[in-house]
Amino acid sequence: MNTITVLGTGVLGSQIAFQTAFHGFEVVAYDVDQPALDRAAERFRGLAARYVADGVDGASEGAETAIGRIRLTSDLADAVAAADLVIEAVPENLELKQGIYRSMNEVATESTIFATNSSTLLPSDLAASTGRADRFLALHFANEIWSHNTAEVMGTPETDPAVYAQVVDFARRIGMVPIEIKKEKAGYLLNSLLVPFLQAGAELLVDGIADPAAIDATWRIGTGAPKGPFEIYDIVGLTTAYNISRMGGEKQQRFAEILKKQYIDEGKLGVATGEGFYTYPRES
């Protein structure tokens, strides 16, 4: 694999693209329009600074160089034309993802491998729409991937074992620790542990038990963990939290309503916009 395409330049998509470029790959980053690409360019500059600030090995020389390895485009055919691997990181919406795979399959080469970064959907939910189920699997990254560097690899019964092995090797080459998952599980390993924790925090808020700051402080002080659930929601992004919560049970749907009315509709999407449950310095 030499050329990697990342579909979607949101919080995690931009990180995947930058981490891949930082490790020497040529990257094409795709999003739907020029304003989205302009935001992606800002994210890449912010990531370069963050790698240096966090002391990532080689960042003082390599972070700016990585930006030069990323090409931005809003033309899907152009984005995937030369790709050896396409990593899809578009919003968690089944119909949206299925549609983009159908479109992508028409313009990508037969040898291109498709991977989804979906955090909630099974790859089997998407395999038929890819038109290449044997060359499709899930490759899931954690947020802040330069330090939380797991890469969960999960195939379907139709995934070619050789393709699976190629993707494991790619993950290792970009500085990840490949986590090989033996069979399909919604939420993989990380989110199977994380999502119930986040939902418990959300339900405490919905039930009026305590406010986000109190819930977060209780978790941090009581466990020694660096962040509570609402701090994590802000990092993940409230749009992603909304899309996942609205598909849940009654209390999760009520939490989705809170997110929509009190935060998303007000432009408060979390760390990326400078405000969510908390306020932050805006991304440079």
Image (cartoon, rainbow, N blue to C red):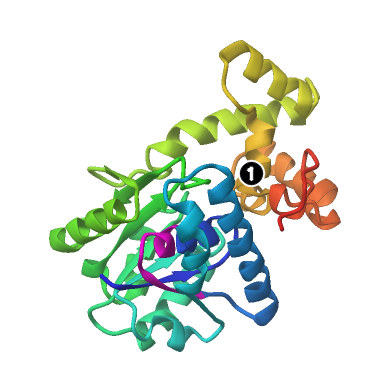
Most foreground residue, 246 or 83: 83
Q: Is residue 67 above or below residue 268?
A: below
Q: Report helix, strand or loop for mark 1.
A: helix
Most foreground residue, 31 or 17: 17
What is the x, y in percent for residue 136?
Answer: 29, 65
The range drawn in magenta is 19-29
Q: Residue furthest front?
A: 61
| Quadrant including the N terminus | bottom left
Q: Is residue 49 above or below residue 225?
A: below
Residue at (27%, 59%) from the top-left corner?
170
- Is 167 included in the stretch rendered in magenta? no
Along the horizontal axis of the image, is 141 left or right of 96?
left
Residue at (71%, 55%) from the top-left corner?
283
Local packing at callout 1 (Cα closer than 10 Å; few below 14, some 14-19, many 20+) is some
What is the x, y in percent for residue 58?
Answer: 42, 51
- Judging by the rendered image, the residue that carries numbered circle 1 is 235
Most foreground residue, 162 or 14: 14
Q: Residue furthest left?
A: 162
Along the horizontal axis of the image, is 98 left or right of 253?
left
Snapshot quadrant of residue 157: bottom left
Note whether residue 221 is visible.
Answer: yes
Residue at (14%, 58%) from the top-left corner?
161
Q: Is residue 191 above or below residue 19?
A: above
Along the horizontal axis of the image, is 39 left or right of 44?
right
Along the horizontal axis of the image, is 12 left or right of 19?
right
